[in-house]
Image (tube, rainbow, N blue to C red):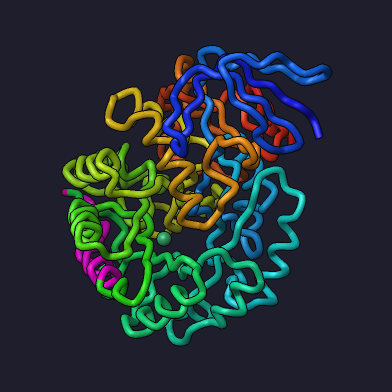
Amino acid sequence: MPCLLLKNGLVIDPASGLEAVRDLLVKDGRISRLAAHISAPQGCEVFDAAGLWVFPGFVDMHVHAREPGAEKSETLASAARAAAAGGVTSLLLMPNTNPPMATTAALKKYRARAMGLPVNFFFSAAVTACRAGKKLTDLAGLKKAGALAFTDDGSCVEDGELLRRAVKIAARLGVPLLDHPELARFSGAGVLNRRVPGCALPAIGDEAETFAVLRDIMASGSGPVHLQHLSLKASVGLLRAAKAAGLPVTGETCPHYFTLSDRDADPRDANFKMKPPLRSPGDRAAVLAALADGTIDAIATDHAPHEHCLKEKGFLSAPFGVIGLETLAPLCVTELVLKNLVSKLSLAALLSANPARLLGLRRKGALSPGLDADITILDPRAAQRVPEHFFSLSSNSPFKGRRLKGWPAAVISSGRFVFKAGRLFC
Ligand SMILES: [Zn+2]
């Protein structure tokens, strides 16, 4: 295993509260030492990190890789490349593949395919058989087969009683239960947040999310519940109140909900179509406030690749979802840190420490000696436009052409560079 010395980077470690210029030594795939000055051991590669920000590798707890079933949109290998380029060294895959990850056999096969990829893949499994919302899967068996979380993401577990039973079992198994809070009976065929004058596209009302969030919070009486991709002022308000009441509820949001609003959504461009939809400027401000005050625990991408021909079908017919792995870091740096809304240490908690803790990844999410050497190094100075094409097989991003700062300069996974100066090493 190579030895690697990062010199003079601004090391940001939420576990110890450290934010200071340090040298960081990596040996045998682990963080070995942090100090004001470390001399390079013989044969050790030295990387000059002066002026750069050194974060624990990002842990993205919400990624769709499309394999098996839609490999033209993304594969495990292409998702790994997009993650490496985006500074995401660990990711949790959602189970809405085809077939879905709802059986131990499917999950074992899927895990085997991800072996040897350059970033760390973790797996969630479906809560209900075929993600159909009727009957629980073999949750204990799925845990044994390697599921790190349970979710029907893509759909909500609509049946409240079934959800409560799942929450109880998940709590007993010590596996996080994640819910996609959207009651389909309220969202119906909606595609946008509100009706746009002169445009016939149907809207998704707020109640689809808020009623689901309220119901999930009530289910947390039976065990921990994590709320996925929160987008509304009312949702984050409910989460804040639930936490104040001591309920075991946590939540995530995605970069598009704190950088865009429904005013930005172009009804002629399906790259602005996602679920939940882009919300009002007031909702966006509330999500930002909930990130700033710690109500929201994690930022996840909900990376949802769709090949070009699918998004070309127009706003009504195109599938929901946008890619996010490769724009995660610069959106967070530009919109949160450089605007002084979230500190660098809080950002490290949102992107690394908190998701690692929620998923029980004890060796990830921090830069303490002995932990896995997963490290994301960002450049806060150089501005660059979001490109038209990505390492992902898909390019359905609403951010193309946007000028951002905070792009990854180098990314280290298990002690090895997987990305450096715009080039992948995987
Ligand atoms: Zn979802």
74 relative position to 133: left or right: right
> Measured from the top left, where is residue 242 in percent x and y?
22, 62
State the extent of the magenta-drawn residues as a range. 197-217
Is 73 located above or below residue 40 in the figure?
Answer: below
Q: Give the quarter of the figure containing the C terminus.
A: top right
Residue 296 vs residue 115: left or right? left
Q: Which residue is at 64% across, 21% downward?
A: 6
- Give the percent coordinates (x, y) of residue 223: 37, 72
Q: Is residue 344 above or below residue 383?
A: below
* Camera-side residue of 85 and 37: 37
Identify the residue at image location x=35%, y=80%: 164
Q: Residue at x 32, y 37 (%)?
A: 259
Quadrant holding the N terminus? top right
Residue 182: image quadrant is bottom left
| Displayed quadrant of residue 230 | bottom left
Q: Find residue 371 and report its horizontal and vertical position in percent.
A: 62, 41
Front residue of 366 and 100: 366
> At x 58% / y 76%, what residue is drawn?
102
237 sits left or right of 324 in the view: left
Is residue 320 rendered magenta in the image? no
Task: Specify the quarter for ligand 1.
Answer: bottom left
- Is residue 149 visible from the viewing direction of this image? yes
Instruction: Give the camera-side residue of 78 and 292.
Output: 292
| Residue 391 shows up from this direction | no
Is residue 207 covered in magenta?
A: yes
225 vs 302, left or right, is: left
Q: Nearer the viewer, residue 218 or 134?
A: 218
